[in-house]
Amino acid sequence: MNKDLSISVLNLVYVREDYDSKDAFDRMIDLAQHLDHSSYKRYWISEHHNMRSIASSATRQLIHYTASKTEKIRVGSGGVMLPNHTPYVVAEDFGTMHEIYGDRFDIGLGRAPGTDMMTARAIRRDINQGVFNFKDEIKELQFFLSDQESQVIANPGSGTNIPLYVLGSSTDSAYIAAELGLPYAFASHFAPKMMKEAFEIYERHFQPSEQLDKPYKMATLNVIMADTDEEAEVLASSHYQNILSMIKHERAPMKKPVEDMSKLWSTHEQFVVESQFPIQVKGSKETAKKQLEFFQQKYEVDELIIASAIYDTDAWKKSYDLFEEVVDELKES
């Protein structure tokens, strides 16, 4: 186990069954405050649109809200879907938060819109230009956050040099992160198949930059932990139902956990849902240790970003606590 391994959080801001978006925001803050003085390094919030199960559509507002309710943990985007936003406005928004709360922010950047194309066009009319110009828009954002003089400056924003991170689920993003010399975060929580190849490309083509002198590999990992493997499996049923809902195009809020999933899915549906999670940590501490050691032996990442889809808030927080204990114990062994 890498003794320098960092752990962080990705919160999709799930809306639970029988609750609303306000409740999702309250739980988002509850978890952030719970982990504020832990060893978790950063607390990232995703960007998704037109989904009843996820309330993280106005990501920068949620980042601002989280920063206002915490003291220590870094807060950022996992990520800002850059095709939906102009680099200039992103620089101004994060620059403003930087001035209010200090050097506590990260800007994770994705090249996908985080939604279907009809919704994407409602967000930004020139959506295709944003997707195809991802690398150029990252460079433009870097410029607005730098102290370089220009007729157009981001104020606040200029001179803050807020760190940028390239997010991706394919090899395309790996080439961009390598060329720009930026940390690379792979979305292995939903698309792990190309992760090994993407990391190899990133390391092979990496060019040092002002932000980073050597490759920095990050991976988002689904984690559901409890005192026993059986309890973790029950908790995981909420996540299974989430994916099943998406497959059926229902987009329903996160369902309560169930003891027996066999009543809810067919054999084929079970296969499709479970194929979405070839890489995950699920179970008790002893089980999780074995899974995490296997993952690290294969991928050797510098940082794990933990996503956890659990219905009950106390069980959700406990899962993060247990994973932190597992990492600490493996580092000491």
Image (spheres, grey):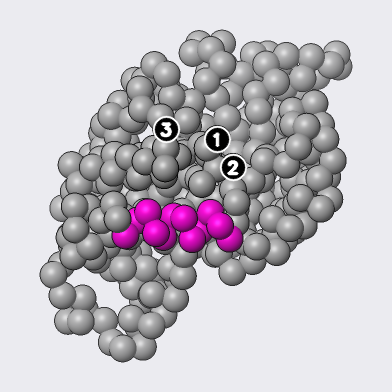
User: Which amino acid, mark 3?
Assistant: Tyr
Viewer-closest of 249 and 259: 259
Which disc, if any, is residue 4? 1
Task: Please tell me how crowded label 2 is: few (under 14), some (14-19), or many (20+) other residues with Cα within 10 Å.
Answer: some
Viewer-closest of 282 and 237: 282
User: Which amino acid, mark 1?
Assistant: Asp
Q: State the residue at coordinates (53%, 54%).
A: 296
SS type, badge 1: loop
**Disc 2: which residue:** 302
Q: State the residue at coordinates (84%, 16%).
A: 148
Task: Please tell me how crowded label 3 is: few (under 14), some (14-19), or many (20+) other residues with Cα within 10 Å.
Answer: many
Above or below residue 30? Residue 127 is below
Q: Are marks 3 and 2 in contact (CB under 8 Å)?
A: no
Magenta segment: 287-298
Residue 305 part of the magenta segment: no
Task: Please tell me how crowded label 1 is: few (under 14), some (14-19), or many (20+) other residues with Cα within 10 Å.
Answer: few
Q: Are marks 1 and 2 in contact (CB under 8 Å)?
A: yes
Which disc, if any, is residue 75? none
Residue 87 can be seen, yes or no: yes
Quadrant of the rendered image containing residue 229? bottom left
Can you give x and y, in whole percent of width and height, for residue 127 in the image?
A: 68, 52
Looking at the image, tell me whether mark 3 or mark 2 is earlier in sequence order: 3
Question: In the drawing, does residue 6 fall left or right of residue 72?
Answer: right
**Disc 3: which residue:** 40
Viewer-closest of 289 and 39: 289
SS type, badge 2: loop
